[in-house]
Image (tube, rainbow, N blue to C red):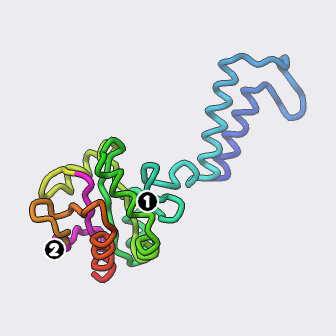
Amino acid sequence: MIELRNNILKTIVKFLGYRGIERVQSPLVSFKTFQTFIVLFALTLSVMFPGIATSHAASPGWNNGKIKWMNFARGLKEAKRTGKPMLVVFEAKWCTICKQYRRQFYKKSVVAMSKNLTMVMVNIEKNRGLQKKYSPDGGYIPRTMAFSPQGYLNEGLTASHPDFKYFIEPKSADELLNFMKRTAAQ
């Protein structure tokens, strides 16, 4: 990783026209050179700090500051490492019911219970494969599902809605909290 970072930095320096301390080009750099510098600089930062661009998997508004949301792949690795079950929420930015539902994740009791789980957020627009794979009773959203630490869907752990097994009432934290407790106990 260090060697890759050093090679990227050497390339940036080369594009800016420096060789050691000597300057080999005029102080003015072309716009194209500047664009290349910005791209290489961003690449260097992503190599040096790999988590910086993907610290939150959740769309804004899901209490990202207090709940550690992850994408599915990262959440699965974390669940296997810690032995904590995964609570997976399927959502979309345009979903009005999701906007109501996400308010429940600001409740102190829900935040506290989230510490016992691996919290995973799946945006259905960006993850169509997961959306399709985990839609046993339809592709509605929001959909909240419980997974074992090994990544298996617990189909027996459902919400109370008679037609939509994984739909949790968005206006009250009671059903969500109950679902989280049952997920943590599996």
Q: Tell me the crowding category of disc 1: few under 14, some 14 to 19, or many 20 or more residues within 10 angstroms, Cα based.
A: many
Residue drawn at (38%, 61%) of the image? 120
Q: Is residue 125 above or below residue 37?
A: below
Is residue 46 shown left or right of residue 165? right
Q: Which residue is mark 1?
A: 70
Q: Please name the predominant secondary structure of the magenta segment in the image.
A: loop
**Residue segment shown in magenta:** 141-157
- Per the image, is 41 magenta? no
Residue drawn at (40%, 69%) of the image? 118
Residue drawn at (52%, 55%) of the image? 55
Residue furthest bottom as drawn: 185
**Residue 89: where, in percent of width, then height?**
32, 59
Identify the element where label 2 is drawn. Answer: loop
Q: Which residue is mark 2?
A: 156
**Residue 8: where, in percent of width, then height?**
66, 39
**Residue 131: where, in percent of width, then height?**
24, 50
